[in-house]
Image (spheres, rainbow, N blue to C red):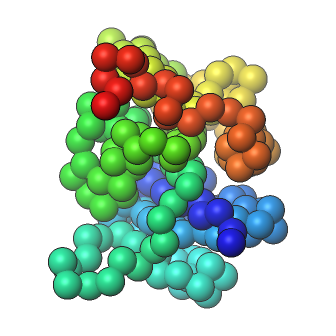
Amino acid sequence: MARVLGVVGCAASGVESLRTGLVEPALRDGWRVAVTLTPTAATWLRSTGELERIEALTGLPVRDGPRLPTDARPHPPVDCYAIVPATANTVAKLALGLGDNQALTQVSEAIGTRGVTVVVFPRINAAHVRHPAWPHHLAALEQAGVRLIYGDDVWPLHEPRSEPDRDLPWTSILDAIRAARFGEISDQDSAIPPNLSP
């Protein structure tokens, strides 16, 4: 049975390439892919027809809202989540454990779920990094075992509204997901501090 990759896309530049940059390569790698979008990202991709193309490709509905308690779960259980692109807002909320939309709710729970790997690519600029809370958000996620894809070698930072047109670092993102698939990066089991283990 194929392992399941939960792709979560946020409303940031690059989400329009989610299908070609991440979903299609993950399917080729043998993952079953289930996509969830933040509400604004869903609006963007629905307006271009990308949401429907993703659904046709994966054979699963793209989620952007909660289900009714009586509805069946639309996605199978996820083995690895990839939050790509993640806005600064999403990173901050994940670090604080806030789940105010379907995408955040799923990932916040996954961060505390044993055996589920979480990979996050923060799609940020230099101003986000200078915010005094930013280093604390990253530290909280790293302490929880989240695999963050960032740094000058992956995503050199530019000032707001001054960065060049560029693709997301799909190769680095896919490498982290592949490592998770083949057990080359640790999951949250090894990252939970002893005093928090049940």
Residue 7 percent location from the top left of the image: 54, 59
Q: Quadrant of residue 56?
A: bottom right
Query: Does the rendering let one see residue 62?
Result: yes
Q: Quadrant of residue 173?
A: top right
148 vs 50: above or below: above
103 relative to 117 in the view: left or right: left
Residue 93 percent location from the top left of the image: 30, 38
Query: Does the rendering let one see residue 125?
Result: no
Quadrant in which the C terminus is drawn: top left
Quadrant in which the N terminus is drawn: bottom right
Residue 175 percent location from the top left of the image: 77, 42
Q: Nearer the viewer, residue 83 or 47?
A: 83
Question: Residue at position x 52%, y 44% from top?
Answer: 115
190 vs 82: above or below: above
Q: Residue furthest front?
A: 198
Residue 71 percent location from the top left of the image: 26, 85
119 vs 52: above or below: above
Question: Residue at position x 44%, y 54% from top?
Answer: 10
Q: Nearer the viewer, residue 71 or 46?
A: 71
Question: Residue at position x 71%, y 41% from top?
Answer: 183
Q: Nearer the viewer, residue 7 or 71?
A: 71
Question: Residue at position x 18%, y 77% from top?
Answer: 69
How many numbered marks appear? 0
49 vs 15: above or below: below
